[in-house]
Amino acid sequence: MSLRLHDARRGGLVAFDPLPDRDHVGLYVCGVTPYDTGHLGHAFTYVSFDVLHRYLEYLGYDVTYVQNLTDVDDDMLRKARETGEDYLALGNRWVATFLTEMAALNWLPPDHYPRATQHIAQVLSLVERLMENGLAYAAEGNVFFDVSADPSYGQLTKMSSDAMLPIANERGNIPDMPGKRDPLDFVLWQASLPDEPAWESAWGPGRPGWHIECSAMASAYLGEQFEIHGGGADLAFPHHESELAQSEGAGAPRPWVSHWTHAGMLGFKGAKMSKSLGNLVLVRDLLRCYPGDAIRLYLIGHHYRSEVHYAEADLARAADVAATLRRACLRAEQLSPADPACADPSDLVQPVAGHRARFLAAMDDDLQTPDAVEQLEALAEIALTAEDDAVAAQAGWMVRELGGRILGMRLANVSAPEAAINA
Ligand SMILES: [Zn+2]
């Protein structure tokens, strides 16, 4: 079997097929807008894509992972105005917190972590091409994407236009922005208010719209076409739909992206976690009581596309499992030096080989991590109870190989970043 991965545009699981004639696989995941605290829901998204990143590398692909930083937008500027802080300083503060938390969860940092404010030239060049192609219009210092001129708008999320507008409005669209012909048209370039940062453009001083920065940064680092674009499920519309329309409208080869993958939302107390509802669970609070491995294992105990409803009892159970996995690794270390059979599966004994094969089959099936974790637990059980020391050692080393390299667990004692957060 080989990897099958969800693609929202094609509407199902499809074989992962890297683009031809490239020496790397491109993975772009929409990053945070650092104007306020992150929460466990963000961690679910980024841990999910970290597992995808790790699994692709395990399969032998050279992955270029790009995650952007939306460091100028309406939310950032509103918050900076409220707190009297410079918007870039505000962003840097929250980015530092986010990166510390993700380090505690043992993510592989992106290869590129670009900021919107440093890619204005690429944004403006995209806007110009959309104007030339008749897909955009300027009005009152703003430039809008003309949704009515693009018959393929909606190809990603397949929503009716009636369903689109209320969701767009919930997620940052301003339907009555000056100059808009249709409330669903979205802003590519936005005139700045007098107290907002502004960059020169052919349409007057302004700043990028939210969607265009991701189109610009993804192609700046990954080329005109790339393999995987991810983000939280709440970004599918309008953000990703609009990114796709902009990039293909500006001339990117179709399809711009092979796989659109979305991580499910995380809820608590019966509602999606959100600052306004006051039901946030913060990673840094959890790290005071649980090791990073436990939090990571709790998150990947759910398939990445599923909706997760947080309950601390489930996290506590994950902590027990993480401790068992760690004991299995420690037993293996006591019994033997690293087992070379873990690298050369033809030398594996049964039942270790069987659990490894089922683990990999689960991962190939659109990253069914809950099934993969079951196989790890079975291996740990063998490591801790097998009478044959050689079998026990091999099972324990396999827990480290699969749980560490692919699922990203440390399987060791509490590490430096966690200790820093706990201090
Ligand atoms: Zn984005």
Image (tube, rainbow, N blue to C red):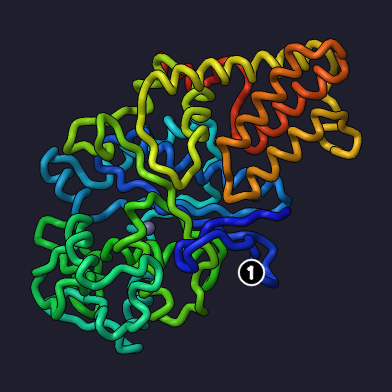
Please indicate whether residue 283 sits to the left or right of residue 180 in the image: right
| x then y, percent, for residue 111 | 55, 50
**Left or right: residue 416 compared with residue 142:** right
Q: Residue at x 42, y 52 (%)?
A: 231
Up-down relation of residue 18 to residue 41 (above or below): below
Ligand 1 in which quarter: bottom left
Residue at 53% across / 37% down in the picture? 107
Q: Does residue 120 appear in this view?
A: no
Nearer to me, 419 or 370: 370
Which residue is situated farthest in the right direction here? 347
Q: Position of residue 288 (x, y in %)?
A: 39, 16
Label 1: element kind: loop
Vertical position of residue 245 compared to residue 377: above or below: below
At which x and y percent is residue 119? 38, 63
Amino acid beneath label 1: Leu
Q: Which residue is mark 1?
A: 19
Q: Measured along the vertical axis of the image, is residue 317 above or below residue 148?
A: above
User: In which quadrant of the rendered view does residue 17 lie?
Assistant: bottom right
Q: Residue at point 36% right, 29% down?
A: 310
- Vertical position of residue 3 compared to residue 359: above or below: below
Q: Residue at x 32, y 83 (%)?
A: 150
Instruction: Give percent across and percent down for residue 400.
Output: 70, 27
Report whether the residue tagged 1 is closer than 8 Å to ligand 1: no
Work out whether residue 171 can be spotted.
yes
Indicate left or right for 389 with 66 as reference: right
Q: Which residue is at the front of the view, 328 or 219? A: 328
Instruction: Name the one closer to the observer, 70 or 59.
Output: 59
Q: Quadrant of the C terminus?
A: top left
